[in-house]
Image (tube, helix red, strand yellow):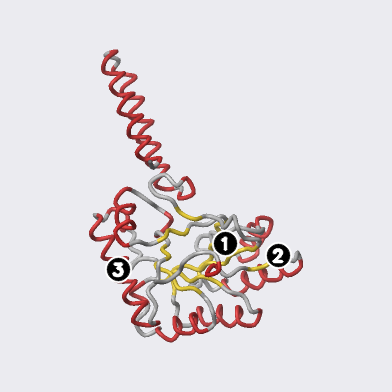
Amino acid sequence: MSKYNIARITFLLALIGCLYLQNFSLTIAVTLVFVGVLSAGAFFIRWNFYHTSMHCLSNSSALFLTFDDGPHPQLTSLVLDMLKKHQCKATFFCIGNKIKGNEHLLQRMVAEGHTVGIHTWSHSYWFDLLPTYKMKQEIVATQLEIQRATGLVPTLFRPPYGVTNPMLARAMKYTHVTSIGWTIRSLDTVIKSSEKIIAKITPQLSAKRILLLHDTQPCAVEILQSVINTCASSNLLIGDIQQYVKCYR
């Protein structure tokens, strides 16, 4: 049973108790707490509140690199160059409507041993308000576009902004995708100083963890170089997620 369903049952029992006691103030308080829990569960993907996401790989001894929001016509190729130079593998969660015209980048990802995942079709600000069938359409459309470009059907999915809810949980169940979260969030789309980002994430780099970066940011290569250097100096491996998770079908 999901944490969401447990919370619903708990709230219902508490509400029945409040009504029995005819305590209006307590009823309001319990309702506000319930709404607060639902909101926090939506925004904190690591809670696994509405569905389970993978935030680390406990059976590994490596750090895992992931990149969201691509492909970018120029920056993604620079990230791939850096990864190739150091023989590192990464997972790229691609936005479906960015793939057309950039198929060669996805083909290069696959050819060089990286993993391609789904990051919805549009990455809309309003994605989380869509009904289940619309979310399902976005996941499937991106899946088909990746298949068209690479010949592979991806099964890894990262929710936009890491926001989850019951509609998304149902859409993921219908499409049989695996949700991948993160352990380390770089905030590289918010923090514009690469030095500050590097200072933020470096102390967190360790085995089993998943690092979230974006191959659409100008600082991506500089940050990636720093991460690779830190891992090399501390003998920390950079892992290949395909060795631990089923990534295609």
Amino acid at the residue labelled 1 = Leu
Image position, residue 198 (x, y; %) = 65, 63
Tell how many labels: 3
Image position, residue 20 (x, y; %) = 27, 15
First in residue order: circle 1 vs circle 2: 1
Are discs 3 and 1 less than 8 Å apart at CB?
A: no
In the image, 240: left or right of 46? right
- Vertical order, 94 against 38 (above or below): below
- The residue at 33%/81% (across/down) is 148
In the image, 138: left or right of 202? left
First in residue order: circle 3 vs circle 1: 3
Q: Which of 137 and 216 is in front in this view?
A: 137
- Vertical order, 222 against 26 (above or below): below
User: Which quadrant holds residue 174?
Assistant: bottom left
C-alpha span from label 3 to label 1: 25 Å
Label 3 sits on a secondary structure element that is: helix
Which class describes the residues within 10 Å of circle 1: few (<14), some (14-19), or many (20+)? many
Image position, residue 70 (x, y; %) = 44, 73
First in residue order: circle 2 vs circle 3: 3
- The residue at 30%/18% (across/down) is 18
Q: Nearer the viewer, residue 208 or 131?
A: 208
Instruction: Name the residue that disc number 3 marks.
Output: 140
Amino acid at the residue labelled 3 = Val
Label drawn at residue 75:
none
Which class describes the residues within 10 Å of circle 2: few (<14), some (14-19), or many (20+)? some
Instruction: Name the residue that disc number 2 marks.
Output: 236
